[in-house]
Structures are given as structure tokens and as C-alpha cells.
Image (cartoon, grey):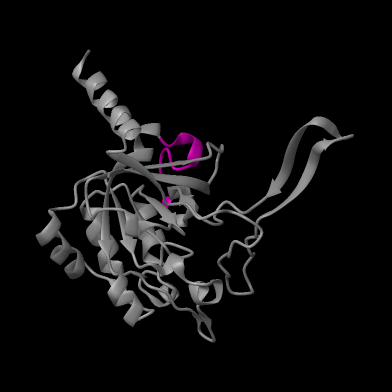
Amino acid sequence: MSSSQQAIAQVLNGMASGSIKVVDLTKPLSEDTPVIALPPEFAQSPGFSREVISKYDERGPGWFWHTIHVGEHTGTHFDAPAHWVTGKDLPDNTLAAIPAAKLIGPVCVIDATREAAADADFLLTPEFIENWERTHGRIPADSWVLMRTDWSKLPVDAFLNMQADGSHCPGPSPKCIEFLVGRDVLGFGAETVGTDAGQAHLFDPMFPCHHLMHQAGKFGLASLCNLDQLPATGAMLIAAPMKIVNGSGSPVRVLAVVPA
């Protein structure tokens, strides 16, 4: 058996024995899934909806299936570079064109739960990450960076946290995203409805995670959950969206392989 075969066998044996576990970082997708709201002058993304095609009845006596209708960026979802204007001209920028090997990588989890609980507008900064690196080591290239805030545990109203001036939720600062692009990460993930902070329309550039990550050909993951079940380092992330031709993103089942 080759060394690569042995490595795969070790993972499979670990999963069978319970020494390695799989953590689902995906929120269930349903008609109740909250959707980001844009200013009224822009087109809105629809919520998830479905209708029965047949259900063991005269329309199909032996099978059950639905027609579904959903925006690409609904629920736990994957952002491809083509999602933002800054990534529109890049090669391999849509879902069907992304190399499959880029959908799997190591994951670094940066815990900002205390800060987000104290301040809904908390911003992740390079200084915060550098302090994390002093404990956990330098963020490696081609890794996912996930911002843990426990925001996914909030009820819908608090999760969206819409005020008169828009949403208020934590996220990365522009300098933070510049820093992570410099680390050559695969992408950035968050527990909030999108990858940017709620007030990111006021930043320069606006929506920096979208603007800068996708400009660099990087990816985004939004509406994650269960980040409290991951170690700071040492886990592997699998984020495989639907292979939609010219797709800018899709709902995704995000899985982490974690030492138990």
C-alpha cells in the first residue's frame, strides 16, 4: 500500500473508530431560512420555496420529488469570484469552472465570540489575527479562515439585526481581508447572513470581503454554524457547491473532518 493509500485508510479507519468525526457546518435550508435584504432600489433575492411534483400519487405512484426555487446565495452558501464585479473577468471564476481540489482545504477558526457578544458591529482586524497566530501559528496558504461569533445561534430577528440604518452584525475590516489575501487563503467564512459586516456598505471599499476576496479569485462561505465544534487548527474543510454552469454561488453542504 502506498503512503497516499495509507493516509486515506487512516482517515477512513479513524471515522469508523470514532477518533475522527465529521462536523456539519450547514444550517438547514427551508422556507424559514432568512435572506439578506438589499436596499429597495435593487432586485431582491427570493427565499427558498418548493412545490411537489409527485408524492406516491397519481402524478407518480412510486416516487417523491419537488421543484425548488431559491437564490444562489441563500442559507449556508458558497460565493464564487464571479459573484462580485471585481471578480467578473477572472479565469475559473464560476462554480462549474472551479477546480475540485480547491473545494477541500485546512481550516483555521478565529474565535471572536466574546467580542461579537459585546459589540454587534465588531470588526476582525489584522492585529486580532496576528495575536491568534502567536498562539496557533501562521495561517497557511490555501486554507479557509472562519470567523467564529456564535451568531448562528441567534433567533432570526437578532441574526439579521436590522435597524433603521441597516443590519448590524460582526465581520471583517477591509484591512483584515487585505491581510488574508496576502496570506493567500482559499477564502473567508462567517456565521452571519453574508461574509461582510452588517455596516460594510459604509466601508472603503464597500463590502470589502466581497470586493477584495473575489478580486483575488478567493471564495466565501456564509451562514455557517457549529463552529464551536471545531478546533482552532487541525481540521479539514469540504465545501462543494453545486456545479452550476456560470453559477455565481449556491447553497452548499459544508463539512469539517475533525480529530475527536
The residue most toward the left is 134
Left or right of residue 181, residue 220 in this image: right
Q: Quadrant of residue 237?
A: top left
Residue visible at 44% across and 43% down in the picture? 93
Up the image or down, 123 lies above or below 30; here it is below
Q: Is residue 128 visible?
A: yes
Up the image or down, 118 lies above or below 258; here it is below
Up the image or down, 168 lies above or below 249; here it is below
The residue most toward the right is 58
Which percent across, then down, holds residue 203? 37, 74
Q: How many marks?
A: 0
Left or right of residue 40, residue 107 in this image: left
Which percent across, then down, holds residue 76? 50, 54
Q: Could you tell me which quadrant the C terminus lies in? A: top left
Which percent across, then down, holds residue 133? 14, 59
Q: Could you tell me which quadrant the N terminus lies in? A: top left
The residue most toward the top is 1
What span is colored magenta in the figure? 86-98
Residue visible at 58% across and 53% down in the picture? 29
Magenta-colored stretch includes residue 92: yes
Q: Quadrant of residue 151?
A: bottom left
Residue visible at 11% across and 60% down in the picture? 135
Residue visible at 47% across and 52% down in the picture? 26
The residue most toward the front is 17
Dominant secondary structure of the residues highlighted in magenta in the image = loop
Which percent across, then down, holds residue 145? 29, 54
